[in-house]
């Protein structure tokens, strides 16, 4: 398969295929006839793994570590469990922060509806923000 065929098969972009090839996660062979990169079943399966991992929140660095473990004949599963637990905690924290931000924003909107606009001065840009206490 060529880049576009692989991308189409997995409903992704050729740019994505080229990116993972460039960083060494995909290792296509070169055609002796025309020098084009040819992707086989192994690369298709690897890219499918990468896309699934990305959908679960794993970073490119995480994926490189996992594939390295696998290529060295080791099970990446303990690493995967460790990383996903950390990502879950990070996500919970970001979610908590987002909920708090949403609340501050709602309070700001409610407060600002009662205040008039003001022309900026030499030391004030927008009094709504500068006077807001969250």
Image (spheres, grey):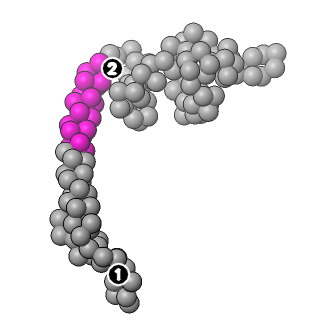
Q: In the image shown, does 22 or 89 lie closer to the viewer?
A: 89
> Magenta residues?
76-95
Q: Which mark is residue 76?
A: 2
Q: In the image shown, does 116 or 107 lie closer to the viewer?
A: 116
- From the top left corner, tell me how far across and down residue 102 is, in percent: 24, 51
120 relative to 89, above or below? below
| Prevalent SS, magenta region | helix
Which comes sooner in the sequence, label 1 or label 2?
Answer: 2
Q: Quadrant of the N terminus?
A: top right
Where, by quadrant of the figure, is residue 78 drawn? top left
Q: Residue at x 25, y 44 (%)?
A: 94
> Badge 2: how crowded within 10 Å, few (<14), some, or many (20+)?
some
Where, by quadrant of the figure, is residue 15 drawn? top right
Q: In the image shown, does 128 or 16 lie closer to the viewer?
A: 128
Q: Which mark is residue 132?
A: none
Q: Is residue 91 left or right of residue 64?
A: left
Viewer can see residue 86: no
77 relative to 95, above or below? above
Which residue, given by chain and number where applicable, does mark 1 sit on?
118
Q: In the image shown, does 110 or 132 lie closer to the viewer?
A: 110
Q: Is residue 21 magenta?
A: no
Q: Is residue 52 left or right of residue 114?
A: right
User: Mark 1 and mark 2: span between their CA atoms?
Assistant: 59 Å
Q: Is residue 123 left or right of residue 3?
A: left
19 relative to 101, above or below? above
Q: Secondary structure at mark 2?
A: loop
Q: Quadrant of the C terminus?
A: bottom left
Q: Residue at x 66, y 23 (%)?
A: 3
Q: Secondary structure at mark 1?
A: loop
> Badge 1: how crowded within 10 Å, few (<14), some, or many (20+)?
few
């Amino acid at each position: 398969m060529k880049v576009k065929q692989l991308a189409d098969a997995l409903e992704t972009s050729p740019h994505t295929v080229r990116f993972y090839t460039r960083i060494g996660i995909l290792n296509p062979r070169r055609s002796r006839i025309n020098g084009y990169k040819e992707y086989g079943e192994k690369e298709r399966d690897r890219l499918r793994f990468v896309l699934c991992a990305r959908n679960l929140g794993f970073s490119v660095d995480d994926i490189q570590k996992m594939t390295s473990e696998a290529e060295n004949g080791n099970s990446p599963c303990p690493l995967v469990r460790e990383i996903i637990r950390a990502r879950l905690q990070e996500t919970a924290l970001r979610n908590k922060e987002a909920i708090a931000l949403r609340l501050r924003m709602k309070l700001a909107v409610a407060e600002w509806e009662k205040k008039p606009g003001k022309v900026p001065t030499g030391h004030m840009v927008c009094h709504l923000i500068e006077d807001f206490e969250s």
